[in-house]
Amino acid sequence: KVMSFFMASACSQEQKLGKKPKMYQPIFEITPEIEQHFDSPLRVKAEATVEAIALSKSISSATQQQQVELAKASGWGTLTDIWVKANHLGNTWQYRCHEKLSQLLTQAEIQAAKSATATAYQTSFEVIRAMWDLLGDIGFTGGAIVEPACNTIAFMGCQPALMRERSQWVGIELDPIFAQIARLLYPEALIYAQGFETVSLSDNSFDLAIGNVPFGNYKLYDPRYAHLNLSIHNYFLAKCTDLVRENGLICLITSCFTLDAANTSFRKYLASKLELVTAIRLPDIAFKRFANTEVVADILVFRKLTETELRATNQEKLSIS
């Protein structure tokens, strides 16, 4: 059912256009050189992140070589150690990174960076590619895609080439520095430099929501979802549910507590709108290589129910009652 929908959707897009989707030249993609960089020691990754930030502040468009350097930015989570004053004794790499960032960033940007160290991480390219393989097996061939909390929107850089030709991207990144890096890497994408809760996007307008959402037992304020009293990761999932079309897919990395929480109310809410296609629990070291952190997370894939399916479900509930 899912496969036939996306094959038909891709065909109808080409018919409307009267030609193949426009190709952007050059298209940036994650290369083996970039992947190998993330096997480097923490010092090397931190220094590369600082250099990428400096570069992003000095250019309005990027050459292909500059894009390679920008793509080595790991996220604020890699820079946690540079804010610890005890690490500044002597000419340490933490001290050097701290001094350079202090010259590059405003006080507001520094405070935002410190606040983001707990959640702002680059997702493993291996995990990203596995997610695309999974979506391809389901039958997804392209379409309108949204990535909330996109960091440098690496999901786009790892998307299979043919699928990417058929796709249009929207990324949302709270941090303006990493939003700018995303724009420099993928100028064909529409990038919002603001919080997901403040972005106004039309319901039922995307074929796929994909990404690695922030985890935590804290909340964002969005009056539309306030009655649900959601943790941040569940909020992202709830909003994505409204953004995707009927039969659209949601493929997110989220906290294990989305499925494991003792309170079942949110899972019941999801079940009233979505079909769970698959769930994969990642090992707790899945983010160690890229982000220097260990968390338990799940890849969850959902399909949004159609109006016909929702009516049938509601009718069944009425019959039972």
Image (tube, rainbow, N blue to C red):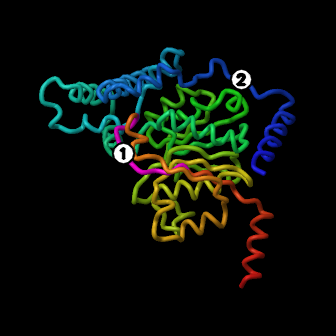
Q: Which residue is mark 1?
A: 294
Could you say whether the residue bearing mark 1 is in a helix, strand or loop?
loop
Hey, which quadrant is residue 241 in on the image?
bottom right
* Residue carrying label 2: 23
Please tell me whether residue 207 is drawn above or below residue 191 in the rendered image.
Answer: below
Look at the image and say whether residue 295 sits in the magenta stretch: yes
Q: Is residue 55 above or below residue 13?
A: above
Rendered location of residue 197, percent (x, y) = 52, 53
What residue is at 73 percent from the left and 32 percent from the top?
Answer: 166
Left or right of residue 268: residue 58 = left
Q: From the viewer's perspective, is 207 left or right of 221?
A: right
Q: Which mark is residue 161?
A: none
Where is the C terminus found, in terms of image quarters? bottom right
Q: CA distance from mark 1 to mark 2?
A: 38 Å
**Label 2 neighbourhood size at 10 Å, few (<14), some (14-19), many (20+)?**
few
Quadrant position of residue 319:
bottom right
What amino acid type should be assigned to the residue bearing mark 1?
Answer: Glu
Question: In this rendering, would 30 be left or right of 144?
Answer: left
Q: Residues within 10 Å of mark 1 (few under 14, many from 20)?
A: few
Residue lying at the far bottom of the rendered structure: 321
Element carrying mark 2: loop
Frontmost residue, 77 versus 51: 77
Point out residue 64 in the picture as x, y percentages from the top left corner.
54, 16
Q: Which is more N-terminal, label 2 or label 1?
A: 2
Q: Which residues are magenta?
A: 290-299
The residue shown at (17%, 37%) is 85
Instruction: Give the residue at x 54% y 49%.
Output: 299
Residue in the picture at 40% in, 34% down: 290
Tell me how many marks there are.
2
Lateral position of residue 155 relative to residue 77, left or right: right
